[in-house]
Structures are given as structure tokens and as C-alpha cells.
């Protein structure tokens, strides 16, 4: 069996054009991709966004973060921007929903109850039931809430997350340990009917089988008349795999999960080296 080809590093990529490419849509993951390890947006992004807008290139954040969090991070430039939120389960432009993939209440409740059992068995984890209006949690300790606040600026503490009155689109589980080793295996039975994806070192998301960033991106491409050849995508973790498949200009960050590196066509500098900005500058000839 032949080995899977490793993506070509950005600076040596023979497939990259000498001049500007015909890119109409740029989609980037946030954590570990656009943001550095301190979760900061590179300062150079803001003038770049102005130039992309002038050229008619749509820039779209695609994240496991909720829409309210993304809208706040890009508040000064949000007009006309498409936000692919909650790992593709909720897509919004100018406050108007473009698409969503709601999760059945019974499934969300089942995940939450599984997490309760994990906690009872000594796993340091907590469920975040993600609705369109807010996220909902039962854990009240500051260590857990500090992690929730990073990704869900709109969140509420409730007595029972299985009984929230909202359109639930995802259940995210935060594990203070490595999520791939404890929480993900415990949630594996849900994979028979739903999508269970490790979206970060400490996060596992449970969504409908039809929901992922790639499905959201393909829907957006169809709506806008933009082809995969005109689409550039950046990602670093397993929840980015499907959207990498939806773009011919797919870039894994140098710090990406090995499976992401093998799935992408090219390799960008790391998130701590402003890899997204450096790549856009190179490919579009900015």
C-alpha cells in the first residue's frame, strides 16, 4: 500500500501560482488556526480584511465557537461576513440564519446523561448544550465556566440541561484531560446515529450526521456560485477535515493534527507564525 502523500509546504509548493489566484471565498478555523496559542487574532488581519473586501473576496470564520462569540470577535467588520458557527450546524450572515441542522432533544439529552455518568465515575468533564440563542451548562465551578466563556459568550447555568427551551444544534463536552482518551470513547456509541468529532484537545462535539463544517461550506458555495477551485480553507483539527475536502486550496497548519496534515493539499506556517495571513498574502499576491 502506498503511503499517503504529505502536503507540500507553503514556501516550496510548486502548485502555488506566481501571481494572484482567483480566490473568491476564504474560510478559516479559529482556534489553533487563525488565533495564536494565546487565542489572539493577528493584528494584520484587520487591514487584510479591508483589502479582501475591496477585491470582492468573502472571508468566513468557521469554528466550533457559537455565533454570538464569533460576531463579537468580528463586530467591527461583521457586515456581510458569513459566520459558520458551532462546527457548521449554524450559519449566519448579517444576523440572518442561512442554514442550521438542529439536534433532536432526545439525542442531546442522551449525551448529557452520558456525561453525567462519566462525571460520577470520576472524569473531570462537563456538557455544554448549544442552542441558537444560548449555550446551557449545569456545572457551576469557575474552572469549567472559564473554559465555557472562551467559546460561548452567551451561556446560562441551568438545573437541567436536558430540559432547555431552545433549538439545540450541538452538544459540546469539555474534558480537562485528553478528550480522545476518555470522553470520546464514552460517546462513541452515539456515532451509530450521530456525528461524534474530537474538535480540540479537550473538546468533543456531538451533532447530526449531516452536520459538519464541510456541509455548511458546500451549501455556502452553492448559494454564492463559488467553486471549490475558488475556495481557500485553513484548519488544524479533526473537525476541519470535511471543509478541507470542499476546497482545492486546502491548507493544514504546521501545528495541525497529523490526520489533518495528510488530508490537506498544502501546509501553511503555524498559527503562532500568522500562517493564515502569510498564506493569503502569498496566494493572492497582496
Image (cartoon, rainbow, N blue to C red):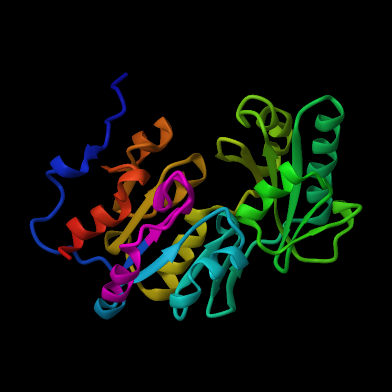
Q: Position of residue 13 (x, y in %)?
A: 16, 43
Q: Is 189 left or right of 55, judged from the image as shown?
A: right
Quadrant in the rendering for residue 262: top left
Q: Position of residue 245 (x, y in %)?
A: 39, 48
Residue sitting at x 58%, y 79%: 95
Which stretch appears magenta? 27-52
Q: Position of residue 244 (x, y in %)?
A: 39, 49
Number of marks: 0
Q: Position of residue 202 (x, y in %)?
A: 61, 36
Residue sitting at x 76%, y 65%: 167
Residue sitting at x 30%, y 49%: 275
In front: 145, or 254?
A: 145
Whether 8 is among the magenta residues is: no
In front: 221, or 16?
A: 16
**Residue most extreme to the left:** 18
Give the answer, above or below, for where 204 lies relative to 33: above
Residue sitting at x 31%, y 77%: 53
Give the answer, above or below, for where 240 lies relative to 201: below
In front: 227, or 264?
A: 264
| Image quadrant where one finds the N terminus | top left
Quadrant in the rendering for residue 115: top right
Whether 36 is among the magenta residues is: yes
| Image quadrant where one finds the C terminus | bottom left
Amino acid at each position: 500500500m502506498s503511503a499517503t502523500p504529505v502536503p507540500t509546504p507553503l514556501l516550496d509548493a510548486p502548485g502555488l501560482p506566481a501571481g494572484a489566484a482567483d480566490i473568491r471565498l476564504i474560510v478559516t478555523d479559529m482556534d489553533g488556526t487563525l488565533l495564536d496559542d494565546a487565542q489572539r487574532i493577528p493584528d494584520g488581519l484587520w487591514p487584510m480584511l479591508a483589502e479582501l473586501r475591496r477585491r470582492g473576496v468573502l472571508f468566513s470564520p468557521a469554528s466550533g465557537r457559537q455565533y454570538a462569540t464569533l460576531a463579537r470577535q468580528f463586530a467591527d467588520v461583521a457586515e456581510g461576513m458569513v459566520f459558520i458557527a458551532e462546527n457548521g450546524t449554524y450559519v449566519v450572515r448579517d444576523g440572518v440564519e442561512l442554514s442550521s441542522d438542529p439536534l433532536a432533544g432526545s439525542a442531546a439529552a442522551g449525551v448529557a446523561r452520558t456525561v453525567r455518568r462519566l462525571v460520577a465515575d470520576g472524569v473531570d468533564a462537563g456538557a455544554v448544550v448549544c442552542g441558537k440563542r444560548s449555550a446551557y451548562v449545569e456545572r457551576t465551578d469557575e474552572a469549567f465556566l472559564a473554559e465555557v466563556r472562551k467559546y460561548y459568550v452567551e451561556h446560562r447555568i441551568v438545573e437541567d440541561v436536558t430540559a432547555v427551551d431552545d433549538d439545540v444544534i450541538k452538544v459540546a463536552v469539555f474534558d480537562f484531560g485528553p478528550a480522545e482518551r476518555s470522553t470520546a470513547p464514552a460517546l462513541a456509541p452515539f456515532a451509530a446515529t450521530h456525528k461524534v468529532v474530537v474538535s480540540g484537545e479537550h473538546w468533543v462535539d456531538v451533532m447530526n450526521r449531516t452536520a459538519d463544517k464541510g456541509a455548511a461550506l458546500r451549501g455556502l458555495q452553492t448559494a454564492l456560485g463559488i467553486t471549490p477551485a475558488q475556495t481557500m480553507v485553513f484548519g488544524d483539527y479533526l473537525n476541519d477535515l470535511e471543509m478541507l475536502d470542499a476546497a482545492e486550496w486546502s491548507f493544514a497548519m504546521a501545528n495541525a493534527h497529523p490526520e489533518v496534515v495528510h488530508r490537506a493539499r498544502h501546509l501553511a506556517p503555524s498559527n503562532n507564525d500568522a500562517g493564515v495571513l502569510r498564506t493569503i498574502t502569498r496566494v493572492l499576491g497582496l
